[in-house]
Amino acid sequence: MRSLPSIALAILLVIAGCNSPLIAGKDPRHIPVTPADVPPNSDRGTLAPGVTQTDIVRPKSLIDAHREVLENRSVTVEQTTRSVAANGTILTQVAGTDRYGPNRTSYNLTTNVTETRSVDSSGIDRIAEWSDGETQYRMVKWNDTTTYRPAYPTLQITHQIHSILSIFNKTDVVEVENVSTENGLHRYAVQGKLWFPNSRKTSDERAMRTTGDVLAVIDERGFVRKYRSEIRYQQNNSTIRIVQTIHYSNLGTTTIDRPVWVDTAVNATEPTNENRHQWTMKNNTSSKTALSQ
């Protein structure tokens, strides 16, 4: 990957939750839904925690409910964050598939970074992390060189949830639709606009302006199953779009496999004392074959 000499890559990495996304292979600009009347929830007066027929009235309540559904359940999270030029060209993309065990101490994470601009410097192409609950390893491919090292437990799933909450806090809901019912649970599509203060205006002129869009599919428990946000900003007289999609799946059925590259990582590192989190590198290992596993 070649590094992006603008704020776009930094925004991508932050939004994507990289501490070192809806459905893979489909156009992230559209979540297909079938509109229908929205039935009220007579028990709580809301469709899902913090959500009414017209608004997300308490974003934190919605995200707390989302977090509660995920608690003690394994899950797969597919996410993609892209910067897109005005003509539709993808400038930079951070795409990952994260698999977590029920207690989050076991996981298998893979993030790929790609960039289509032609510049001279190079950067990260791929980050992978794996944990069995006892030890954690990280693999980083940088400029065709692959290095391995032990890692600390990840907080990436927490960053993803915080990213959604941050966007919902800035969302002005336009429409809430009932889209389906599965296993007795109603699902809703929530569409909205993103609003931010325009800091370039004077205090008298400062007003709220639309800078993006949000579309999320949630169920009546508050579980955010699919999520998409688009943020637009001006750069060099051109509009750049930052598009993030996230898809949660295989809730309670996700399994954590041990990647082949972990064996190489074990051989490349060794513990310095009884504390399993303190390690030294035996060497920096370059391996193109490990990345194909």
Image (cartoon, rainbow, N blue to C red):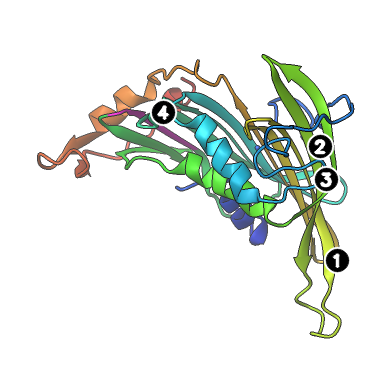
Disc with the residue nearer the chain's start (4 vs 2): 2
Give the number of the disc on residue 196: none
Q: Residue at x 57, y 53 (%)?
A: 14
Residue beneath label 3, please? 54
Q: Is residue 112 visible?
A: no
Pick whichever, 272 or 242, lies toward us: 242
List the single residue furthest toward the left: 274
Disc with the residue nearer the chain's start (2 vs 3): 2
Give the magenta-colored segment's residue range. 127-133
Q: Residue at x 49, y 43 (%)?
A: 158
Cα separation, mark 4 vs mark 2, equals 29 Å
Cα separation, mark 1 vs mark 2, equals 23 Å
Give the number of the disc on residue 107: 4
Residue beneath label 2, please? 29
Q: Quadrant of the N terminus?
A: top right
Residue beneath label 1, please? 237
Q: Amino acid at mark 3?
A: Thr
Q: Quadrant of residue 190?
A: top right
